[in-house]
Structures are given as structure tokens and as C-alpha cells.
Image (spheres, helix red, strand yellow):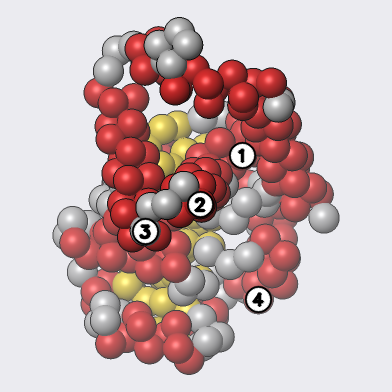
Amino acid sequence: MSVELGIIGAGNMAEAIARGVIASKVFSPDQIIAVDVSPDRRAIFTTQLQIRAVESSLDAARDAKIVLLSVKPQQMKEVLGQLGAALRLDALVISIAAGISSKFIESHLGARSNWRVIRTMPNTPMLVGEGMVALSAGAHASAADLATARRIFESSAAVIEVTEDQIDAVTAVSGSGPAYFFFLVEQMIRAGVEMGLTPEHARTLAARTALGSAKMLLTSSESPQELRRKVTSPGGTTHAAISHMETNGWPDITTSALHAACARSKELGSA
């Protein structure tokens, strides 16, 4: 039976994508098949999403018009080797794996060299319908293929299109980005508790502050620097905190950390 979307690797990100396309009626559950070696992950897709879930990647490869590669980068070479012989020749291949180039995917699928591949970098806020995704077309993918990928991801994320040489930077900024904010909020909660707040109050204060600040960034025409300046009165409490951050190297630490994430993405692609 032909299906619209075959998901190879039914992890959390794949679940977010599946939930999004079902909720927005891009695809119905019976138009999707999911593959995972974990019985627990298959059970989630079967019982919660009513998506047929199987253990063998070949089942999805034979049936799916669109194949979503959502396995770990370190597993990609092996998975592609299994898929190549069974994949429909007219299939559109979409990858969400960090560091794995479209050229790598094309070459390791074998059999032919003109596979239509879209490389993407989503992030975990897709789980709550607030994701960010960047798309990049491989050598043989068309504008129509990009539009298809956009339709899938727009169900739970904002979508931009970039050139493939920018995807590693996207990975560093938005792909890994949620962890940076969680880390900051984690430290804000810790400091709040040290200063006498309850953990519950500290979490609410920090999380709501993060949410409100993000909304201001998205809805204001002003730059982050200007928004920060408006909160930072000379000699005030915010000024004391920002000055401490700058004195202790926060700006350089932050930018160098993102460069490290970008470099690691490149390493994953060359491994």
C-alpha cells in the first residue's frame, strides 16, 4: 500500500512532526508509516497517533512517497545502505540529521545519483507548535520539493530556506539553541532559590520571563540591543547584572560556544 510519509526513526522530533502534520491535516494517520527499533517508540506512534509502526526500514522505503530520515547522524550511513535498494525511485528524501549533507545521502543511497534530497534542521519547540526549521535543497531537489517540505514543517514551526553551506550555522543557532535557553533558565532558577524563592516560584518567574521576552523580540521592530537598553537603567539592578556578565566574558563565551556547535556539526558530516 502506498503511503505519503515514511518516518525512519520514530524519536521525539519525528513524533512532533507527525503530530503537526496530523493536526493540520497535511496527512492523516493512515497515510503515514513509522519505523523504529524500539518497541516503546513504536507503541507511542501506534496507540497515541494511530500510525502504523514497524521495525524494518525496508517496509517504509518500499511504500512511501516521502521519506523522513530522523535517525542519529552516526547511524545514517548504515540506514542509507539498507534503504537504497528498496526506496522508490521517485521518492522525496527529507533529512533532519545534524551534519549529514545531501551529497552524503545521495551517494550512500546508491543505485543512482539523482536522488531528490531536502536537508533540514528543526528544533524541539516543534513539540509545542513553536518550532524553527531551516530547509536546504540538494542538487536534484526542485522548488516543488522545497514546497512539499515546507508544508510538512509549517504545521508546527516557522520555516526559512537557506543554502546548504549555512545549515551548520543554523544547527548552532536554532537546532541546539533551545538547550542554551534551558541552561540559562536553569541558572536563573538556581539563583532565585539561593536568594530565598521557592523552586516553583523561581521556575515560573524565569520561564514566563523567557516567554515574554521572546514574544517581544518577535513582535517588536527594535533590535535585541535596543530592547535590552530599555530595561537597563544606568546604575540600576539590570545594569549590575549585565556589567557582571560582560566583565566575566559572557559575550565571548556565548559566541564561542555557538562556534563549537557549528564545528561539531561539520565534524558529524565528515565522520
Residue 202 lies, in percent from the top left, at 37, 51
Q: Give the CA distance from mark 3 to mark 4.
A: 52 Å
User: What residue is shown at x 65% (from left), y 55% (from top)?
Assistant: 105
For disc 1, the neighbor class at 10 Å (few under 14, some 14 to 19, many from 20) is many
Q: Along the polypeptide, which appears first: circle 3 or circle 1?
A: 1
Q: Which residue is mark 3?
A: 198
Q: Amino acid at mark 4?
A: Gln
Residue 192 lies, in percent from the top left, at 44, 48
Quadrant in which the C terminus is drawn: bottom right
| Eye-nearest disc, 1 or 4 | 1
Helix, strand or loop for disc 1: helix
Q: Which residue is mark 4?
A: 82
Nearer-the-camera pick, 23 or 6: 23
Identify the mark at residue 194; answer none if there is no mark.
Answer: 2
Q: Along the polypeptide, which appears first: circle 2 or circle 4?
A: 4
Nearer-the-camera pick, 220 or 4: 220
Q: Disc 3 vs disc 4: Cβ atoms closer than 8 Å?
A: no
User: What residue is shown at x 75% (from left), y 46% (from top)?
Assistant: 264
Q: Is residue 136 above or below residue 63?
A: above
Nearer-the-camera pick, 132 or 186: 186
Q: Amino acid at mark 2?
A: Glu
For disc 4, the neighbor class at 10 Å (few under 14, some 14 to 19, many from 20) is some
| Eye-nearest disc, 2 or 4 | 2
Q: Give the CA distance from mark 2 to mark 1.
A: 31 Å
Q: Give the CA distance from mark 1 to mark 4.
A: 30 Å
Helix, strand or loop for disc 2: helix
Helix, strand or loop for disc 3: loop
Q: Amino acid at mark 1?
A: Ala
Q: Which residue is mark 1?
A: 172
Q: Is residue 142 above or below residue 73?
A: above
Q: Disc 2 vs disc 4: Cβ atoms closer than 8 Å?
A: no
Q: Along the polypeptide, which appears first: circle 1 or circle 4?
A: 4
